Image (spheres, grey):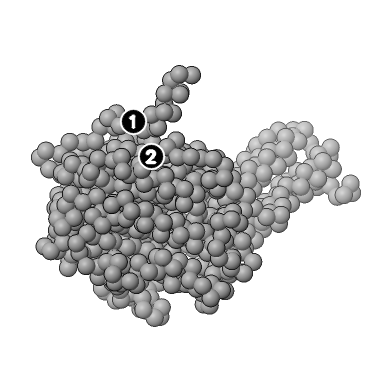
């Protein structure tokens, strides 16, 4: 190594090549970018070059040997950034954006989840840094102490700009309006690279932040017109049929529909849920084509969507980035219109996902967080309280609420990386060799058993028969990073189309006094829950801003947009700009109807973003006697906990 010495400029170019090649290898091996033609293949290889030249080129302005140190520091920072993206993608099949960085107060609960995403082969990410340090040590003595002629770093930066211009031109040729039609971050990374994506994301967030300042009362009109035109009149037989009935909404964490009726080792994974789906005497209506519509906010997105019938933000979570907005939520509406009391039950710290602040904006009366539960070590795993003690301890809390109430119970155990104590397992893991996927079925069985006991407790306490019971899945549990294991379990290739179909999550509804409809094939999404519940309790929803429609209405709109701009209808689907027959998965040539639906979905997403980014509901009164929610009216936390704190 001592005989291998390089000049300052050669050191720089070696760094560029190492970063370029490392990025390309990582794109190929870690990200599912769905490269489909020669131009995309070339751009995937080419796009790291401009970033490497521009960012590392800054180091050439440093004097003497410090240029080498700057190169190593910048290379290290870019490598750390890239590795963070890899780990995040392994967990979420998505990329870190600036808004997700506001969620760092959640990281304390993610230890086990993050540890499961790191492997020893990740040392590869540091190999180029080691090489550069070694080269610097043996070469620096021969470097001039003076600064490079200014034309050299300027030439490098200009080369980087030219490379980016060529990159963008080819990308726009393959996907016109790339930087305008950007609901899907995968496209930006595929065409422009992870580093340029970060720059683009920063610019977009600056633009978004300015929208609230520039918004005025006229901006809400176009949103109001769209939602009123989309509105579905309620079924007269269902409207108000659950008036004054309690509503118990049960959140199944990370639960995907493919688990229903799935058998592992000859056993049903979720026998109790299967019975609710198939036993007509249970009087449930089960929506087998119900999809989650969450994005980076995952569970927090699901909460926002179900209780507000609006989309989450394309980056980050509205619970974190839009917690100062004005909302007209389901709990607040039912309180003002029908005198409902609302509560959320969750065996985790109250500040996770900024819930203790966001719930005040939503007008939620009570928040039963971890301080209300026995959080002994033997009852806690992974993210918080195990589901069985959670449900058991929630029953007396439910009984303490004023009726009618709207109660939302959120489970935790069935969450990545699906950790479970041996004493809690009643089914063997799968045998794919992918630990989190193999355990996924064990925690699903545990959740199923916990739910069965909870339903029985509700019956024993007289809360079951006269309450609306709504059971739903919040988001996917197995990301595309685990496609190999899923292909082994499902016996088919996980294509982009198949992955979209796997975004189904369960929705079961039992309405007192109403015969369940069994399994229905209506296509629907989480956006449709709020208008459905409003109509069940007798609140006409037309004057409220809602992007969903009543599931029991004959006019229900059966297209399901995803946050990234894809969508699914009963007849056709658009996934990553390709149209498919929803039933067969066969690729289709787009018709005028399909293209019109694509434009409708984009318009709906844009209007929802406009409303959130501009905080437009502050300008809107749905009824003459509507009273905006006052967050200062709400205070959360166990009274006993507060008293102890005050005494100290």
**Which residue is rendered at x = 23% and y = 63% of the image?**
551
In this view, the residue in front, 114 or 417, is 417
Q: Report how far apart the C-alphas of labels 1 and 2 lie in the structure.
A: 11 Å
When the figure is inspected, residue 575 is found, relative to residue 466, above or below; the finding is below
Residue 197 on image: x %, y %: 50, 51
Please state if 225 lies on the left or on the right of 162 as rendered: left
> Residue farthest to the right?
3
**Which residue is rendered at x = 28% and y = 52% of the image?**
462
Q: From the image, state whether disc 1 or disc 2 is nearer to you.
A: 2
**Quarter of image, res 371:** top left
In this view, the residue in front, 154 or 349, is 349
Residue under label 2, please give it: 368
Circle 1 — which element?
A: loop
**Which residue is rendered at x = 62% and y = 53% of the image?**
116
Q: Residue 336: in sight, yes or no?
A: yes
Residue 191 on image: x %, y %: 50, 60
Q: Residue 212: in sight, yes or no?
A: no
Q: Mark 1 or mark 2: which comes first in sequence?
A: 2
> Residue farthest to the front?
460
Residue under label 1, please give it: 635
Circle 2 — which element?
A: strand
């Amino acid at each position: 190594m001592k005989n291998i010495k390089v000049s300052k400029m050669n050191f720089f170019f070696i760094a560029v090549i190492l970063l370029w090649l490392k990025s390309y290898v990582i794109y190929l091996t870690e990200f599912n970018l769905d490269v489909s033609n020669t131009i995309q293949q070339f751009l995937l290889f080419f796009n790291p070059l401009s970033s490497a030249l521009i960012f590392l080129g800054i180091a050439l302005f440093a004097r003497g040997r410090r240029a080498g140190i700057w190169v190593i520091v910048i290379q290290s920072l870019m490598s750390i950034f890239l590795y963070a993206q890899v780990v995040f993608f392994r967990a979420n099949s998505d990329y870190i954006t600036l808004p997700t960085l506001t969620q760092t107060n959640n990281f304390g609960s993610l230890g086990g989840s993050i540890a499961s995403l790191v492997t020893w082969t990740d040392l590869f990410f540091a190999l180029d840094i080691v090489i550069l340090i070694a080269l610097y040590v043996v070469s620096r003595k021969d470097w001039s102490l003076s600064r490079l002629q200014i034309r050299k770093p300027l030439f490098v930066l200009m080369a980087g700009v030219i490379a980016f211009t060529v990159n963008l031109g080819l990308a726009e040729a393959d996907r016109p309006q790339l930087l305008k039609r950007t609901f899907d971050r995968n496209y930006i990374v595929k065409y422009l690279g992870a580093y340029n994506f970060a720059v683009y994301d920063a610019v977009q967030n600056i633009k978004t932040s300015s929208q609230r300042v520039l918004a005025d009362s006229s901006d809400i009109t176009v949103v109001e017109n769209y939602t009123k035109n989309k509105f579905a009149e309620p079924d007269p037989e269902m409207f108000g049929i659950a008036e004054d009935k309690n509503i118990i909404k049960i959140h199944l964490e990370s639960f995907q529909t493919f688990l229903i009726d799935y058998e592992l080792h000859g056993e049903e994974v979720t026998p109790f849920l299967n019975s609710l789906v198939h036993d007509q005497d249970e009087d449930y209506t089960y929506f087998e084509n119900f999809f989650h519509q969450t994005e980076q906010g995952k569970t927090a997105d699901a909460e926002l969507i179900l209780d507000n019938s609006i989309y989450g933000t394309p980056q980050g979570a509205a619970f974190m980035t839009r917690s100062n907005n004005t909302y007209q939520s389901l709990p607040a509406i039912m309180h003002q219109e029908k005198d409902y009391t609302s509560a959320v039950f969750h065996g985790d710290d109250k500040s996770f996902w900024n819930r203790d602040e966001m719930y005040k904006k939503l007008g939620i009366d009570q928040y039963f967080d971890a301080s209300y539960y026995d959080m002994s070590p033997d009852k806690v795993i992974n993210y918080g309280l195990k589901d069985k003690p959670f449900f058991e301890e929630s029953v007396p809390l439910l009984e303490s609420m004023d009726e009618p109430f709207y109660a939302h119970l959120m489970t935790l155990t069935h969450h990545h990386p699906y950790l479970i104590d041996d004493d809690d397992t009643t089914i063997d893991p799968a045998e794919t060799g992918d630990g989190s996927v193999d355990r996924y079925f064990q925690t699903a069985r545990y959740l199923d058993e916990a739910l069965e006991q909870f339903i029985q407790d509700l019956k024993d306490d007289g809360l079951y028969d006269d309450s609306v019971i709504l059971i739903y899945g919040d988001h996917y549990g197995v990301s595309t990073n685990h496609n190999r294991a899923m292909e082994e379990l499902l016996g088919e290739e996980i294509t982009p189309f198949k992955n979209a179909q796997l975004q189904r999550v369960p929705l079961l509804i039992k309405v007192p006094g109403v015969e369940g409809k069994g399994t229905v094939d209506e296509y629907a999404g989480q956006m449709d829950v709020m208008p459905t519940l409003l109509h069940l309790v007798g609140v006409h929803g037309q004057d409220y801003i809602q992007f969903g429609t009543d599931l029991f209405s004959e006019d229900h709109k059966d297209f399901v947009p995803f946050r990234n701009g894809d969508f699914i209808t009963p007849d056709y689907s658009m996934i990553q700009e390709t149209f498919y027959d929803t039933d067969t998965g066969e690729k289709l040539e787009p018709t005028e109807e399909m293209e019109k639906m694509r434009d409708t979905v984009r318009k709906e997403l844009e209007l929802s973003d406009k409303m959130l980014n501009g905080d437009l509901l502050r300008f809107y009164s749905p009824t003459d006697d509507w009273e905006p929610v006052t967050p200062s009216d709400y205070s959360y936390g166990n009274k006993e906990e507060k008293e102890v704190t005050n005494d100290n």
